[in-house]
Amino acid sequence: MKRLMLTGTVVSGLLGLFMAYRVASGWLLARPERQVTIAVAEPHERLSSSAENVRIAREHLPHVTWAIDSQYQIRSDHTYLYANEWMPEGNRGEIRFRPLAMVVVNERKGKTQITTLVAESALLKFASQFDVRSPNPGRIIAGALEGEVSVAGPEGLMIKGRNFYLSESAARMYSDHPVSFALGPHRGTAGQLQAELIPAEYTMHSDRPAIIGLKSVRLRRNVKMEVVLKNKQEPLPLHIKTAGSFEYLVEDEVAIFEAERAQKDDVLVYREPVAGQTDWLRCERLTLGFVPRKPEDVANVPAPPTAKPEEAEFRRIRTDLRFASLKAEGRLVRTVSTQQNFKGEMTSLVYNAVDRILVMSDPKGVQLWHGENRLQSPGVQIAIGEADTIGDILCAGPGVLETRDPATQLIQYAAGWKTHLRKFADPETRLDVIELNNQASFRQPGQKTALGADQIRVWVTPLSLAPGRPAPSVASLQSGNLQPDALNIQPRRLLAEKNVAMLSPQLEAEAETLLVDFEGDFNRQPGEKKPEGQKSAGNSSEGMLPASGNPSSAANTKPFRMKAGHLKVLMKPDLKTGEPMVSDVWTEKDFQLSQARIDNKPPLDLRGQKLHLKNEGEARQVVHVYGSPAEIRDSGMLIRGPAVHLDRTENLAWVDGAGNIQLPIEKDTSGQLMAQPEILDISWQEKMIFDGRRASFDGNIFASFASHTPEAINNHRMNCQQMEVELTQRILFAQQQGQQPKTDLAVILCKDGVRLESYERKQGLLTQIRRANVWQLRLEPATGAASAIGKGKLQIWRREPESTIQQASATSARANRPLTADQSPWDYTSVDFNGKMIGNIESRGTTFHDRVQVVHGPVETSVATIHPDQLTKNAGSMRCDSLELIQRQPLESAANASQKPWMELFANGNTILEGNGFHARADQVSYDQSKGLFILKAVGNREATIWREGPGGGVPQTAKRIEFNPTTGKLDVNQATSAGGSG
């Protein structure tokens, strides 16, 4: 497009035409410098020629053979005129010279300049009667150069034509015949010439025509001009032609090419920089403007006629001009460069060479093509830098910019805007800024990516060659030496503001602002460093259970969706492909990042006030989320805290400060598959580290877990100072969708002041409460194993739904069901121990060690307890070295439909049993709640002893084995060693 500026050089050819006119007409219009001296003779009488006249003719008119021996030779100070005859013609006072030759000698800047004019005939009309003996016939008022006319002058000046006519009264000189002209290597032709003159508005000297200057020159019919440019010191012709007209307005210093008729773009400017390749501009009207080459020349322009007209000078044509402006206009203005693969269409193209501004406009949209790139906008303005570099660019009005694939012609890249596109230099960064305003957008349809915002700015390196090379000038672009692949334009920053929307197969985002830096720098925020000493899941198998599985690098096929206030992205070249790759992402203000899963599991979801995502390609990402709280959800897992960190490469998540985690569990604490997955909810006050399989927590930890079975709903709550949770399978944060292994609780380890609560509900009724206080507790839900380290305490409240109680009451006559008749709603059991507790939740058996004390009996409410020193009715207590507690469930059968679950106790070592109305001592004691029966045993040579109140009471009974039912009072003694017997 910039090559159109070269059309300014057409001024060289135009000035050649004007110089020729000035010289050729000067002898007619200019006032003689002194009186011309000639010999007196009659018409047709030969005048002797002087040696000087002959020398001038021989040197400067060698092609005019008759000039040396011409009949008439007239000389002034600078002009030599030759003619063979003259004679009056007609009765209007006209004189014909035939043939006519003239030589004008001028001294300019110390150099002699010669101009010659030759015509077959010259017909002149003077203001007074012409007589060769009277050399002052007055001014010429009309004239004609007839037949073949040629003019030659300095710098290769040449004009050829026929029949040039001058009329003082019409203030016009014209020729209706073809004319050709040249100046140096420049040349041109036209079918007609017309010059409009400036008539004097006052009386001139008697020997001078009433003409004071030239107003305009107009060429008509098939105007053709050829201006020769320089390309690598080689001549490069530039052609201008039109079937219409060319006009030069002298006072305005404007040249105008016009089509033959309206609606026809036959003004053509073209050149052929390389054989077979053409650059051209076509329009209906082409206007070229000029200004003095030196600004001070404006002050030297002759003034208009003064009060003394006899002193007025002839207004000469200024030749020392430079190109100032170009304007191409019409229904369709087209410009094409086959060499640069460029094409443009518009209705107006204006170039201001003084301000160096190029403006293209079209109400329907200027369209520019460069290769497979297309730009469309109602107005395009380009500023040209001092070194002919491309400066600011403004595309006003709605527009598009798109690039197509050369093979398929499908759109590869597209940009759009509603108000303007602007390119300008940023003085701070020394980069170029491209700004799209109002409904701005970028699209890559083939990649299914798009970016939209109210305003988008892109900072790019200035248009340049290979790195280290200076920016190309407009002239270098015009010369055709620049190859497209030599351009090196690199983006450095992108800023999108207001209503930002981004779409790609990997990410769909909405934000208030988006800032993208290319090859920028970044820093970690506090707390982003991976905890020291923590081993990743990818390189370690240490843990409470053997590790299984390895992180996968397969990418997720569902896109991320993000909503954020302010979004910042750092792009770096991919080490493998060199393509831009997202290296870091930061957000400010509230944000949400989610990713749906193809396996229909709960989606990945991140929320908070700030986000930093570090990406190293494939599935190697580190995510840091900050908020009050910050949240990461994935596959049903939730991690919440003030600063949540996720390293997908190391398969590691950690939280600094208080937080919460929720893990989906499919099996209950006994290892039984639940009807639906439940959530293990753990909160803490200090920190959490999770490697996908093992999680450790510190600081006042609270955990809760619910399990659903067809028979009951259980809710568990736990509190401690340290906790570790291990899963049966590792959750892989980088795993491909659909390949995540199913995982359940494997181990729960609690330390330091452990408190455990468990609530069971059947048929909507609370049926069991378990509370435990221990120093350390370990649960293995996968196997049902449970263990604890005391000092500890276990409390159990248990009852059956009302329907079960009523069924039990209907069969209360059975002797071995004493407790079913008791209307107290709760059975209470309390176990204190000082050593270990080992059990199995699935088998419902638990063993306590070291100074064990158990209390059992009915209570009225779920908060009531029984003190061992204040036993209530039907309550009892027992102390021993170790105790095994088993909770039995009736077998499922019609006969057992009304039977309640019951408890069995097995005490061992130094066992002391107390109840209302009795107490006993033995080495071993067992209790079966379903029968209400105690069995006391002695070991070795020791004896079991029981004391009872009532008739005959107070006397101990000893034996090796004693069976006792406190409800019925029945006592069976085996191998008695003292008083007593069956009761």
Image (cartoon, rainbow, N blue to C red):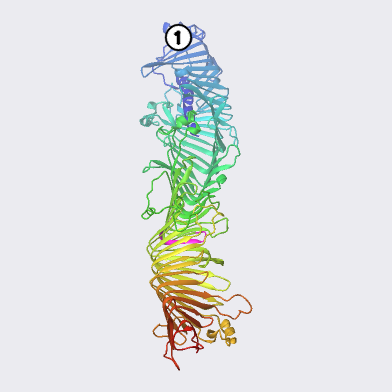
Percent across and percent down for residue 278 are 55, 28
Say which residue label 1 marks.
59
Tell me if residue 897 is in the magenta stretch.
Answer: no
SS class of the residue under badge 1?
Answer: helix
* Vertical relation: 748 (above or below) 504: below
Residue 257: percent from left, percent from top: 53, 31
Residue that protrudes farthest toward the bottom in the picture: 951
Prevalent SS, magenta region = strand
Q: Is residue 515 visible?
A: no
Between residue 156 and residue 616, name the one nearer to us: 616
- State the image quarter where residue 134 is shown: top left
Instruction: Indicate the amino acid at tag 1.
Output: Glu
The one of 427 and 253 positioned closer to us in this rendering? 427
Q: Where 833 sits versus 384, above or below?
A: below
The image shows residue 29 at horizontal and vertical percentages of: 45, 22
Q: Which range of residues does the magenta coloring cover?
A: 634-645
